[in-house]
Image (tube, rainbow, N blue to C red):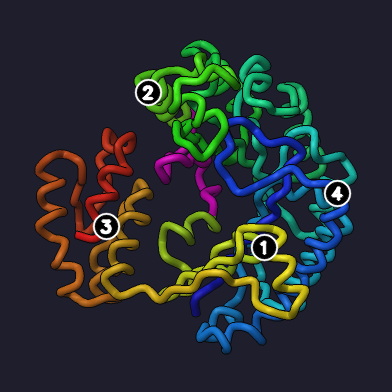
Amino acid sequence: MSTLGVYIQVPFCASKCTFCNFSSSVERSTIFDHYTQMLQREAESCRRHFPALGIPMDILSQPVDSIYMGGGTPALLGSERLSLIVGALRENLHWGENVEFTIETTPGSASASLIQALLNLSVNRLSIGAQTFEEQELRATGRLHSVDETVDLVLLARKAGFQNISLDLIAGLPHQTEESFRRSLEATVTLRPEHVSLYLFEVDDKSRLGREVVHGGDRYHAAMVPSDEFVADAYEAACTFLTSQGYIQYEISNFALPGFESSHNRKYWQLAPYLGLGAGAHSFDGPRRWSNHVSVQSYLARLELGESPIDNLRTLASEEQVEEFFFLGLRQVQGVDLDLARARWGFESVKHWDEKINRLRREGWLVCHEGRVSLAPHAFLISNEIFQEFVSA
């Protein structure tokens, strides 16, 4: 029987980082109670709304084996509200015996009492947004926490009993140098988190800093954003360093000590079903994808009226499902299993891609071995261009 992942979107932050391109915002805490109540209502109302929208109920009967609460900074809701949300999940979904339960936290946002409360709520994995271990880089991007607060949070979580901690790092922040990035990597492994996520700063119009760089502005320390060549070198240096320290790269941006790969994130790359709750949350059951209203106010208003918060629902044609199999699955270092694809969508549906796979293999971008196809290591940095080859061929 298939298992289910659950994603809870809490789109609130204490401050908006200049590099952030997520749909999160700074709101007064007065909205937190209302949002918590509507999250509970959404969890309770899925069984009523799904049939009317043509979504089979199967997804709600699958045992939950991963929960990820992100945003945003979910810790801002506090232990009492988080307890209400977890209670709604337990009442309306089927929890498995061993659930990987992750919550995103920001240094400075979680007290000792909250950390203990998270453990009591069955949270067993923390994802901490360190981003960098350099004070200048933190200040330049609008982060409110200090390096010491990051270290303190990790040590606090360890003392409380957390045995699965992930740290986020970003390459390409303003003022970052080869030396400062190396120091951040060294500080990270000194704390010995079980998991490290390494993201590359995206220069686009979706963040304030990105817009400044794109349009040649000078706000938010845009002039101090390092070059693309630096980011590429930093990524490769990080891959080499983390591997030398015992971390296994299992996905383009993710590294883990053996046995600590993120079960929840793997669901996205392996086309496993997941249910998203909250403003802007996405869901997937195999043939269908749907998402809630991104606007918090629209999300709240729909649920207040007893209506579904779902804003967009589409059924994927089999060709689109195969495309997703490739451009999501190829993010994994192990790549994709062609026999699995043939069993799921038919021999001819996969054969359609043979010519393209063979061309990319000849060009050195893909590796084929024992029925699996994966990116060549040097292709990770241009993965988006390769993934585009598997869209609307």
Q: Residue at x 40, y 41 (%)?
A: 252
For mark 4, what is the residue? 29
Residue 254: within the magenta?
A: yes
Determine whether the residue tagged by mark 4 lies in a helix, strand or loop: loop
Please state which amino acid type lies under the numbered disc 3.
Val
Q: Are marks 4 and 1 in contact (CB under 8 Å)?
A: no
Quadrant in which the C terminus appears:
bottom left
- Residue nearest the viewer, comparing 29 with 325: 29
Q: CA distance from mark 4 to mark 1?
A: 17 Å
Number of residues whose C-alpha sits closer than 10 Å to that of mark 2, classed few (under 14), some (14–19) or many (20 or more) = some
Residue indicated by mark 1 = 278
- The local secondary structure at tag 2 comes to helix
**Where are the magenta residues, as a range?**
244-262
Q: Amino acid at mark 1?
A: Gly
Q: As shown in the figure, which amino acid type bears the numbered disc 4? A: Ser
Residue type at mark 2 is: Asp
The reply, left or right, for residue 114 in relation to residue 252 is right
Determine the residue positioned at 41% across, 24% down: 231
Residue that carries the numbered disc 2 in the rendered image: 228
Query: Is residue 157 or residue 293 the one in the foreground?
Result: 293
Q: Are marks 3 and 2 in contact (CB under 8 Å)?
A: no
User: Which element is circle 1 on?
Assistant: loop
Give the mark, 4 or 3, whose residue is nearer the N terminus: 4
Chain-order first, disc 2 or disc 1: 2
Q: Is residue 211 above or below residue 94?
A: above
**Which x, y percent locates residue 122?**
76, 59
Q: Which mark is first along the chain, 1 or 4?
A: 4
Earlier in the chain: of badge 3 and badge 2, it is 2
Residue ID for mark 3 = 391
The magenta stretch spans residue 252: yes
